[in-house]
Image (tube, rainbow, N blue to C red):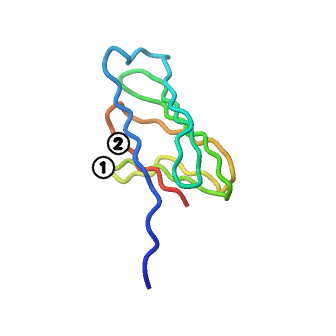
Amino acid sequence: AEKSPRREFLIGPTLPKILLQEGKQYTARNLRYGAALMNVRCRVKEKGEIGVTLQYQSDQPVGLIVQNRDSGKKLARSKKMKSGTLSFQGINGDVYVVMIQ
């Protein structure tokens, strides 16, 4: 049997020092991946930590799973819905895999 292709993309918040001011937030809007439309917001926290929030909507219910690309540690998971919000805590410069189910 043929495997279905994995549906995933990477998020790698890498802000330069000048933008790493605690409390600042940066948003990328209207990012399309397949049938899903997303907004990604990064909020600068202390010591290089970044709060990442994904807002998504899709014609079909989808669930998201976020994991650290290097460690494989799962950081967040959403229920299957047509729209929702998923947040996780990351580190500036780390890369995260977002899997769509």
| Image-quadrant location for residue 49 | top left
> Given the image, on which type of amino acid does mark 1 rest?
Asp
The mark that comes first in sequence, 1 or 2, is 1
Quarter of the figure with residue 20: top left
Q: In this view, does 52 lie to the left or right of 95?
A: right
Assign the N terminus to one quadrant of the image: bottom left
Image point (67%, 58%), residue name: 61
Q: What whole-number distance in Å separates the C-alpha atoms at marks 1 and 2?
A: 8 Å
Task: Give coordinates of residue 86: x percent, y percent.
Answer: 58, 42
Residue 70 spot, x, y in % from top left: 30, 49
Circle 1 or circle 2, nearest the eye: 2
Is 100 placed above or below 32 here? below
* Label 2 secondary element: loop
Label 1 neighbour load within 10 Å: few <14, some 14-19, many 20+ = few
- Where does label 1 land, which residue? 70
**Marks 2 and 1: in contact by CB < 8 Å?**
yes
Mark 2 lies on residue: 95
| Disc 1 element | loop
37 to the left or right of 94: right
Q: Is residue 73 above or below residue 48?
A: below
Tell me which amino acid carries mark 2: Val
Identify the residue at the far bottom of this view. Answer: 1
